[in-house]
Image: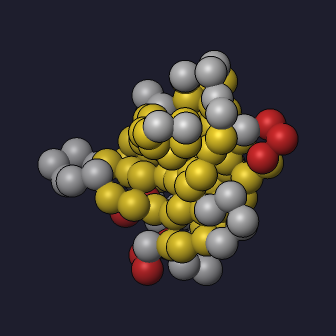
Amino acid sequence: VQLQASGGGLVQTGGSLRLSCTASGNIFRINDMGWYRQAPGNERELVAIIAVSGTTNYADSVKGRFTISRDNAKNTVYLQMNTLKPEDTAVYYCSADLWFPTYEYKYWGLGTQVTVSS
């Protein structure tokens, strides 16, 4: 199973970016999908998560600015990021909780850099 993320880049304060991440390979069922981020010197933190039902949860720091969504038919999760701030600068990682008949495992993408200039 592979998770391929795209959409990162350099943007000015107040700008927008849209990240996408597609899971491929031997997939039985995907439960939660999410986005995490890690800034230099910091721990990896949850940004947003979305259940297969569409229920979402956001970090307080991004509520009202970021929107997570998913296309179950395409095994893809998106993160629309608006009103970006310099403190949003980080490497963003997507995740997918894959369910198999005997176990569940969290897969990670390689990460995509988001840089917000002031």
- Tell which of 114 and 99 is nearer to you: 99
- At 39% from the left and 51% from the top, the residue drawn is 37
Marker count (numbered) = 0
The C terminus, quarter of image = bottom left
Residue 82 percent across, percent down from the top left = 64, 65
Residue 99 percent across, percent down from the top left = 55, 42
- At 44% from the left and 73% from the top, the residue drawn is 59
- Tell which of 54 and 15 is nearer to you: 54
The N terminus, quarter of image = top right
- Tell which of 14 and 81 is nearer to you: 81
Q: Residue furthest front?
A: 102
Residue 4's quadrant in the figure?
top right
Q: Residue furthest left?
A: 41
- At 68% from the left and 50% from the top, the residue drawn is 78
Residue 65's quadrant in the figure?
bottom right
As drawn, is 17 to the left or to the right of 94?
Answer: right
As drawn, is 47 to the left or to the right of 1?
Answer: left
Image: 87 above or below 99 = below
Q: Residue furthest right?
A: 73
Image: 92 above or below 24 = below
Q: Is residue 9 in sight in this rendering? A: no
- At 51% from the left and 45% from the top, the residue drawn is 97
Residue 108 percent across, percent down from the top left = 44, 35
Q: Is residue 110 in sight in this rendering? A: yes
What's the colour scheme? secondary structure
- Tell which of 66 and 69 is nearer to you: 69
